[in-house]
Image (tube, rainbow, N blue to C red):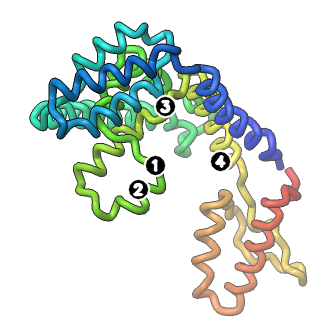
């Protein structure tokens, strides 16, 4: 069968591009001084009780701000206009993001499902155009656009980005609202270019198609004595159908055990890529 090596390497390369892109986009030279001044100003406006939120929010926004987003004056005006300094404003901001992103995510899921219909379901021959639809991510430009119009920065300025360690150690004590806020901020914790998102979608679609084309005709498998243990025309997809057949044969007694051993050998051959075309 075809080797997975090319697909795996392409995925690794694409995700490495994200890190390279982030590393190349150095922070503006003025950002540190601007953050310090804005923190003092905003604490003076909203009070000492908001200091930690102001400090963390400005730091998060500054981490993702690049020269193309605007100069020091643009950054300062943005922070002054978009920091939610009271609970009522913060609640309104959260509820609007939650409602809009729920609609957006659901709509994108519906579009993607329809684009993948021909490759995901048994509806007849798959044309080259079907693979192009399956490899297209209609939401690829979303993160780029949200940073360009600065809505991503609104989130970063007002809601906490958490680490995995923080979620594991402190998450048990968090409320549903705290979890929702950190999930919202996590959405914009990576500034991934649209070109990379599109390439990731393409590589993922090729990987999915590879699996969809990897069918095992079980009747062609022979036991040590030459016996065919599986019925004619039984075609199992790797790996889900093989897994289900393996589970189904737990109740099959000795013959079921023989089938399981044969399926196990098939899985080994899939892993080491020695199954013939």
Neighbour tally class for label 2: few under 14, some 14-19, many 20 plus, Cα within 10 Å:
some
Q: Is residue 103 above or below residue 277?
A: above
Instruction: Give the x, y percent position of residue 205.
Output: 62, 37
Q: Nearer the viewer, residue 148 or 87?
A: 87
Circle 4/circle 3 CB separation < 8 Å:
no
Instruction: Give the x, y percent position of residue 163.
Output: 46, 49
**Which residue does the numbered mark 1 point to in the structure image?**
163
Which of the marked residues, 1 or 4, is nearer the chain's N terminus?
A: 1
Instruction: Give the x, y percent position of residue 250.
Output: 60, 85
The residue mark sitting in front, 1 or 3, is 1
Which of the marked residues, 2 or 4, is nearer the chain's N terminus?
A: 2
Q: Of the numbered discs in the image, which one, if any, rests on residue 212?
A: 4
Q: Of the numbered discs in the image, which one, if any, rests on residue 253?
A: none
**Which residue does the numbered mark 2 point to in the structure image?**
167
Query: In the rendered view, does 13 fall on the left or right side of 36?
Result: right
Neighbour tally class for label 3: few under 14, some 14-19, many 20 plus, Cα within 10 Å:
many
**Which residue does the numbered mark 3 point to in the structure image?**
115
The residue at the point 21 percent across, 29 percent down is: 43
């Amino acid at each position: 069968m075809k080797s997975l090596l090319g697909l795996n390497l392409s995925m690794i390369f694409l995700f490495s591009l994200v890190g390279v892109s982030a590393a190349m986009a150095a922070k503006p030279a003025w950002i540190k001084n601007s953050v310090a001044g804005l923190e003092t100003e905003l604490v003076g406006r909203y009070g000492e009780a908001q200091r930690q939120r102001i400090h963390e929010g400005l730091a998060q926004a500054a981490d993702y701000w690049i020269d193309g987003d605007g100069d020091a004056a643009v950054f300062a005006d943005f922070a002054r206009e978009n920091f939610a300094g009271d609970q009522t404003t913060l609640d309104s901001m959260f509820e609007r993001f939650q409602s809009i992103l729920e609609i957006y995510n659901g709509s994108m899921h519906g579009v993607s499902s329809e684009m993948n219909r021909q490759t995901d379901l048994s509806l007849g021959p798959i044309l080259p155009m079907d693979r192009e639809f399956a490899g297209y991510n209609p939401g690829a430009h979303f993160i780029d656009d949200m940073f360009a119009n600065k809505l991503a920065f609104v989130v970063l300025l007002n809601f906490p980005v958490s680490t995995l360690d923080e979620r594991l150690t402190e998450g048990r004590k968090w409320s549903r609202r705290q979890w929702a806020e950190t999930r919202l901020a996590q959405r914009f914790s990576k500034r991934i270019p649209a070109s990379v998102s599109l390439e990731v979608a393409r590589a993922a679609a090729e990987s999915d198609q590879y699996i969809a084309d990897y069918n095992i005709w079980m009747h062609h498998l022979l036991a040590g004595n030459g016996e065919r243990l599986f019925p004619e025309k039984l075609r199992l997809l790797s790996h889900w159908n093989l897994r289900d057949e393996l589970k189904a044969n737990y109740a099959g007694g000795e013959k079921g055990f023989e089938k399981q051993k044969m399926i196990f050998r098939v899985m080994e051959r899939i892993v080491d890529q020695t199954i013939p075309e």
